Amino acid sequence: MRSESQPHQTFLRQTGLAKIYFAGNLIGDCWSGFQKIEVRSGSRITFAACWAHARRKIDECRSAFPIQVAQLESWIRMLYDVEDQIQKLNASQRLARRRSLSRHVLGLIEEYLSGEEMSPGRVLPKCNLGQAAAYVRRHWKALSRFIDDASIPIDNN
């Protein structure tokens, strides 16, 4: 019987990552296999969620919820506008801009997702927009990682 001293060693062995021993940032959609990868990798891997995937989930709700989708997508576009403006800056400058500009926009999105326009009386939790909003809320920490690390892109496209 094999004895593993730490749970992440089992994960590394089962996935083949033991041979690769990757350390760094993993940017992707919120596939269940990426969940808790930080714990399973012994904190060598930091997961950051991709805003393009989150935006796509929201955009799929446009026909039923045009007002809410337009509002959310306008803020997401602002996040991408900031990224366009800072792409040629050095890491510390990018980080400072993200922390001032992008953090503010993320605050607007977070507030909207918990506000009146997205309340259960207007958006049922099981409808497509309710599920898209739940996806964003559930993965908020991973979607927000790019504002604290200049090396993390806003998406993996």
Image (spheres, helix red, strand yellow):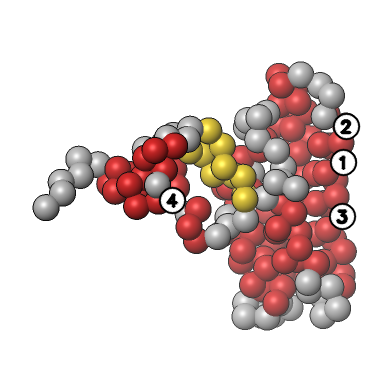
Q: Secondary structure at mark 3?
A: helix
Name the front one of labels 4 and 3: 4
> Are circles 2 and 1 on residues that touch, CB within 8 Å?
yes
* Residue named by callout 3: 74
Q: Nearer the viewer, residue 146 or 122?
A: 146
Q: Secondary structure at mark 1?
A: helix
Q: CA distance from mark 2 to mark 3?
A: 16 Å
What residue is shown at x 87% (from left), y 55% (from top)?
A: 74
Question: Which amino acid, mark 2?
Answer: Gln
* Residue named by callout 2: 85
What residue is shown at x 68% (from left), y 28% (from top)?
A: 150
Q: CA distance from mark 4 to mark 3?
A: 30 Å
Question: Which amino acid, mark 3?
Answer: Ser
* Residue 36 marker: 4
> Mark 3 vs mark 1: which is more N-terminal?
3
Q: CA distance from mark 4 to mark 1?
A: 30 Å
Give coordinates of residue 152: x percent, y percent.
65, 35
User: Looking at the image, is 4 positioned above or below residue 24?
Assistant: below
Give coordinates of residue 61: x percent, y percent.
78, 74
Name the front one of labels 2 and 3: 2
User: Can the viewer see residue 143 in this picture?
Assistant: yes
* Residue named by callout 1: 81
> Mark 4 vs mark 3: which is more N-terminal?
4
**Mark 4, other Cα within 10 Å: few <14 / some 14–19 / many ≥20:** few
Q: Nearer the viewer, residue 127 or 11?
A: 11
Q: Is residue 70 left or right of residue 132?
A: right
- Residue ranking furthest to the left: 1
